[in-house]
Image: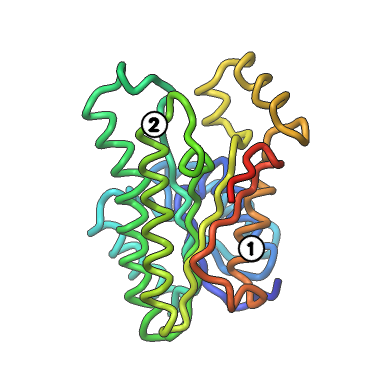
Amino acid sequence: MDLDGQIAIVTGGGQGIGHGIAEALAAEGASVAIFDVNIAAANAVAVAIGAAGMRAFALEVDVTDLARVARACDEVRSRWSRIDILVNNVGWTPNEAFADSQPETWRRIVDVNYAGTLNCTRAALAAMVPQRRGRIISIASDAARVGTPREAVYAGAKAAVIGFSKSLAAEVARHGITVNVVSPATVDTPLLRGMLSAEQIERREKANPMGRLGTPEDVAAAVVFFASPRAGYVTGQVLSVNGGVVRAG
């Protein structure tokens, strides 16, 4: 996909989907900055990428902290001069009925999944607008498009990410910046395995027309496309990566 020389940031790149995205971007030639609150996990990914002959480094970043996000983006620019690609991947939710949930949990879900996207996007745009080029790709969820039981607040936060991305795409297109969304369904990650029972996972596998859950690599392939020159005229779009389990228009 010809990402040689591109500078990418992947939030939540220390594990799961973010790990897959970071490795996929690096494999296509991008240098990758991995933002994660778990610096040990982020460092492990950066080391693995480096061992494969590609460039990566890790930074401990809480995406809900705008000042820290801005400093981290400055560190990326100080090291590599520019920011070409931002992947807003960080996501979190418990699996619980809304009626049983607490306001502090709602705030945390919104802060991580939506405000974190705002913070990282704002900081990255400070680099992208002057250079008149950029790719912003956010990871949403098909829960935002069709709804999922026990994920009501998360679905709302991810729906906000979609609405924000569509609006921002119209604002920044004149600067040569595209803004798109990848919307997975159920992806097999350690977070999912810790949240759902084996029976719940099996039910989701059986409900999928392809008979399996998604993988981080499935999601990463869509991100790489949006980051590539081949998607230069694609902006404000949402691409579901779900094996056909959701077929929303």
Residue under the image location 69 percent in, 75 percent down: 2
Tag 2 secondary structure: helix
Dot 1 alpha-carbon crowd within 10 angstroms: few under 14, some 14 to 19, many 20 or more? many
Q: Quadrant of residue 27?
A: bottom right
The answer to which of marks 2 and 1 sits earlier in the sequence is 2
Q: How many marks?
A: 2
Horizontal and vertical percent position of residue 15: 54, 42
Is residue 34 at least partly visible in the picture? no
Residue under the image location 54 percent in, 20 percent down: 196
Horizontal and vertical percent position of residue 135: 50, 71
Of residue 221 and residue 63, the one placed in the foreground of this image is 221
Q: Circle 1 sits on which residue?
A: 224
Q: Amino acid at mark 1?
A: Val
| Structural distance between the alpha carbons of marks 2 and 1 | 29 Å
Residue 44 is left or right of residue 159, and the answer is right
Q: Find residue 152 and name its label.
A: 2
Residue 219 in the image: above or below residue 148: below
Residue under the image location 77 percent in, 36 percent down: 210
Q: Spot the residue most to the front.
A: 249
Residue 13 is left or right of residue 38, and the answer is right
Q: Quadrant of residue 66?
A: bottom left
For the N terminus, the image quarter is: bottom right
Of residue 66 and residue 105, the one placed in the foreground of this image is 105
Tag 1 secondary structure: helix
Is residue 203 at least partly visible in the picture? yes
Residue 116 is left or right of residue 187, and the answer is left
Of residue 64 and residue 148, the one placed in the foreground of this image is 148
Q: Spot the residue most to the right.
A: 210
